[in-house]
Each structure stands twice: as structure tokens, then as C-alpha cells.
Amino acid sequence: MVLVSAKEMIEKAHEGHYAIGAFNINNMEWTKAILAACQQANSPVILQVSEGAAKYMCGFKQCADMVKNIHDHMGITVPVALHLDHGTFEGAKACIEAGFTSVMFDGSHYDFAENLEKSKEIIKLAHSQGVSVECEVGGIGGTEDGVTSNGELADPKECAEIASLGVDFLAAGIGNIHGVYPADWAGLNFERLSEIDAAVNGKPLVLHGGSGIPFDQVHKAITMGVSKINVNTDLQIVFAKATREYIEAGKDQQGKGFDPRKLLKPGADAIVAKVIEMVNQFGSADKA
């Protein structure tokens, strides 16, 4: 089996009123755990990589080769896409060359005219290689890879213009943020989501910052056109918690408990459990 573009799985999710989980990977353990979970749940999945994580893992080509090799070694049969998360203009082009099957170009920090032109170029290049494309209108709140955004609500008219370029799915700010949600978070702005969904004329939408949003809000967003949900923080938290519990219980000092294959297993198992829980919530289980 080979990795696939995210276009078909996202369009099926949009038509079926469920969402595909797009889980960020940070290393081999993350990749194995997410793939194992989605194979078990019979769910399509998007593995995505931020540019910072790609640098940590020694580059885009290394990420692509690692994912493809693990995918084949594990005998994964569910659809899997490898996606660049919050890519720069040059990063998106590099990922297409490296073998990613989907890319996000995040031009939300440019003025809109430049975002539009750069998005148009990436879409043309990606589609010529059979690669799906996500673009963004309106910054997503919080901080990711050192980039901080106030999370302004996206302009529906600008969303319509980007959608008209032929982008496969669109990220638009609706009050969502990256990282841990503060206690005083106002929640998703469903009025703006409704306006954006109408403006893009049925184009699948992406919910960034999917960790920590109450399930009722996630479910409502899915019914209103969101077909891809990004998750990173939730998996980092459960991995850290399980690893801490292993060490605090002194298991790393029992026998060869310090062996990284044993030390990292509780965290990896926690990721598997969390991903299975989330793909069931998103409705993509048994949709492979």
C-alpha cells in the first residue's frame, strides 16, 4: 500500500458528516502508535508534521521515508496521508518534492493579496503532483513553533476567494487556538463558522487546535462543514502523563526498565488509546 492524498478521505468525510483526525507526529513512537490505533479502529488518518517537528526529525525527506517505511512494515491497510502542518511557502514546495501527499500553506500572516497569490502557486504546483492542499484564512490563536497569533475570526469573503482557487480544504479562524485552552476561553464562534461555510459553497473546512475543545462543540462543528480536525497537544499530554507515571513508580529501575523500548511503551500505549477514542468521537472509525 502507498500513502494517499488527503483529498478523497476529506471529501468522503464531508459528504458523510464526520471528520478525519489529523494527528501531528513527533518521532517514530508517535507514528507507530497513531497508525496502530487507526488500523485497529479501521479509520482513515492524516499524519501531519510541523516544520519544527520536521527539523527535529532531521528533515522532510527523513519524515516521508520514515512514515512510508513504518506504514509498509506494519502492513497498514487504512488510507493514510502525510501532510505538512502550517507550512511556509518554501516548506510546502520542499514537502511536495520530498514525497508528502498533502501540504498546508499557511499564508495567514501575509496581507490577503499576497496570501492569495502564494496560495494559488502552491495549489497549482501541488495538484500537478497529485498532492492535496490546505490553505488558511485568519490566524489561529495560541503559539505553534514560535509563531503567535491572536486568533482573529476569518473573513468569509476572503475564505470564498481562497476556496475559489481550487484548494482542497480550508482552515479558517473561528475562535480556536493552539495548545491548552485557558479557563476563560469563549468557545468556538458558530455564527462565523456558518457564514464561512455558506461562503465557500460546500468546501470542507479544517478545525485547528482540536485538543481540548469540548466534544459537543466539536460535534456541532462537524455538522456545520468541518471535515478535518487537527490534534497535537492531547497526544503530548497523555504521552507525558503515562511516561511520568512509569518513572514515578520506579519501573525504570526494575530490571531493564530503563530500556527505551520499555520506557516509552506506556506513553505510546496512551497515544493508541487516545487516538482510538478521538476517531470514534470524530465519526471516522470503520470508515476506511
Image: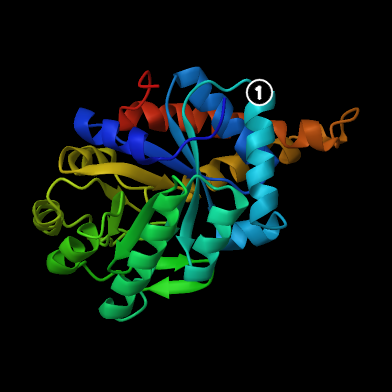
Residue drawn at x 37%, y 48% as measured from the top left:
210
Above or below residue 124? Residue 269 is: above
Picture coordinates of residue 198, whole percent (x, y)? 8, 52
**Nearest to the observer: residue 186 or residue 21:** 21
Q: Residue at x 22, y 28 (%)?
A: 16
What colouring style does the render use? Answer: rainbow
Q: 27 and 182: which one is in front?
A: 27
Q: Residue furthest right?
A: 255
Number of marks: 1
Judge by depth and name the residue closer to the eye, 165 or 13.
Answer: 165
**Residue placed furthest toward the front:** 128
For the N terminus, give its image quadrant: top right
Q: Quadrant of residue 284?
A: top left
The spot of residue 124 in percent (x, y) is 38, 59
Q: Quadrant of the C terminus?
A: top left
- Dot 1 lies on which element? loop
Q: Is residue 280 left or right of residue 198?
A: right
Which residue lies at the image location 28% right of the left edge and 62% below the top edge?
184
Q: Is residue 267 visible?
A: no
**Residue bearing the label numbered 1:** 74
Mark 1: which amino acid?
Met
Q: Residue at x 44, y 47 (%)?
A: 131
Q: Is residue 142 visible?
A: yes
Above or below: residue 79 compared with residue 215 = above
Is 261 placed above or below 248 here? above
Give x and y (percent) for residue 81.
Answer: 48, 39
Would you say 124 lies left or right of 26 here?
left
Q: Crowding at label 1, few (<14), some or many (≥20) Cα neighbours within 10 Å?
A: few
In this view, the residue in front, 221 or 92, is 92
